[in-house]
Image (spheres, rainbow, N blue to C red):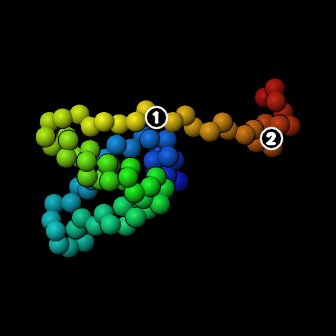
Amino acid sequence: RDLCGSMLQRRLVHLVGTDSHSSRGKRSPALSKARELTAAIIGAEETEKIFLENPTCILRGELPEVLPPVSPPEKKPSFIERLFPFW
């Protein structure tokens, strides 16, 4: 989840889908929880794009409009890295 959240925040996710082949059973497509979690991280408007608008564009043979990625936050040095900066 941490990786997915980070990728969403950095605009590295352009669509969400499932590999399900049936609407019933253990592997039925249940994306509602993923949609809720995504909306909590990036908001409803961007969630709509990656769950509906972008996949629709691709199915039509069009390129979806995507925002440029956001750089990751600068990593703070660990305790050990502060103790031994030359290492």
- Graded by Cα atoms within 10 Å as few (under 14), some (14 to 19) or many (20 or more), the crowding at tag 1 reads few
Q: Secondary structure at mark 1?
A: loop
Q: Is residue 66 above or below residue 47?
A: above
Q: Position of residue 71 (x, y in %)?
A: 55, 34
| Residue that sits furthest to the bottom in the current view | 25
Q: Secondary structure at mark 2?
A: helix
Looking at the image, residue 1 sits to the left or right of residue 50; the answer is: right
Q: Residue at x 18, y 35 (%)?
A: 62
Q: Residue at x 30, y 63 (%)?
A: 31
Q: Residue under circle 2?
A: 80
Q: Is residue 85 above or below residue 48?
A: above
Q: Residue under circle 1?
A: 69
Q: Position of residue 52 (x, y in %)?
A: 25, 52
| Residue that sits furthest to the top in the current view | 86
Quarter residue 22 falls in? bottom left
Q: Residue at x 47, y 45 (%)?
A: 7
Q: Position of residue 10 (x, y in %)?
A: 49, 41
The residue type indicated by label 1 comes to Pro
Quarter residue 36 falls in? bottom left
Q: Nearer the viewer, mark 2 or mark 1?
A: 1
The residue type indicated by label 2 comes to Ile
Q: Position of residue 3 (x, y in %)?
A: 50, 49
